[in-house]
C-alpha cells in the first residue's frame, strides 16, 4: 500500500560524493518525518539524517558537516547529499518514513515504513 523506493547508491572513491533519493508513494495522508539510516556488516543500524514535516533536521554525529538531507514536498521525496565520503561510510542505506496512511476513507493509520535499502561502498 505504501512504498519507499531508494536510488543513487553505488561505488565511490574516498573523498567523493553521492546523492541518494527516496520516493514515497501510496495512500499517504501525511508525512511526519523522513530520513536515512545505515547498517554496516556486523553493526547495528544507525541514524544518518532525518527531516521533519516542518523542515527540522537531525544528523548522526559521524556525518555532521558532510551530509545534507533535503525534501521535495510535492514529490514526497527525500534526498541525502553525501560529500567527503570515507570508507567507514560504507553500508546499506535505508530510507525511513514516519507516515500517516489512509487505510479507508475514514481511517488513518500511523506507522513506520522502510525502503529496501541501497548499497553505498566507499573504496579506492
Image (tube, rainbow, N blue to C red):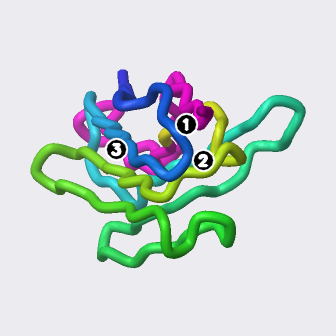
Residue 114 part of the magenta-drawn span: yes
Mark sitting earlier along the chain (2/1): 2
- Where does the C terminus fall, quadrant-wise? top right
Determine whether label 2 and label 1 are within 8 Å by CB: yes
Viewer-proximal residue, 101 or 13?
Answer: 13
Q: Badge 1 is on which residue?
A: 94
Q: Residue at x 18, y 54 (%)?
A: 72
Mark sitting earlier along the chain (3/1): 3
Mark sitting earlier along the chain (2/3): 3
Viewer-proximal residue, 30 or 121?
Answer: 121
Q: Residue at x 71, y 38 (%)?
A: 39
Tell me the element at label 3. Answer: strand
Q: Is residue 115 above or below residue 17?
A: above
Residues in magenta?
96-124
2 or 3: mark nearer the eye: 3
Left or right position of 45 against 109? right
Q: Badge 3 is on which residue?
A: 19
Residue 102 part of the magenta-drawn span: yes
Picture disc at residue 13: none
Q: Is residue 79 above or below residue 116?
A: below
Q: Badge 2 is on which residue?
A: 37
Residue 22: x percent and y percent?
34, 38
Q: Residue at x 60, y 47 (%)?
A: 37
Residue 48 sits in which quadrant?
bottom right
Amino acid at each position: 500500500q505504501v512504498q519507499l523506493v531508494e536510488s543513487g547508491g553505488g561505488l565511490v572513491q574516498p573523498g567523493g560524493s553521492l546523492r541518494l533519493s527516496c520516493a514515497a508513494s501510496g495512500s499517504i495522508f501525511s508525512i511526519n518525518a523522513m530520513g536515512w539510516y545505515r547498517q554496516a556488516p556486523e553493526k547495528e543500524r544507525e541514524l544518518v539524517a532525518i527531516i521533519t514535516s516542518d523542515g527540522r533536521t537531525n544528523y548522526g554525529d559521524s556525518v555532521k558537516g558532510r551530509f545534507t538531507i533535503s525534501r521535495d514536498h510535492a514529490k514526497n521525496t527525500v534526498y541525502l547529499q553525501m560529500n567527503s565520503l570515507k570508507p567507514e561510510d560504507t553500508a546499506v542505506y535505508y530510507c525511513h518514513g514516519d507516515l500517516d496512511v489512509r487505510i479507508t476513507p475514514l481511517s488513518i493509520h500511523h506507522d513506520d515504513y522502510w525502503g529496501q535499502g541501497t548499497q553505498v561502498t566507499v573504496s579506492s
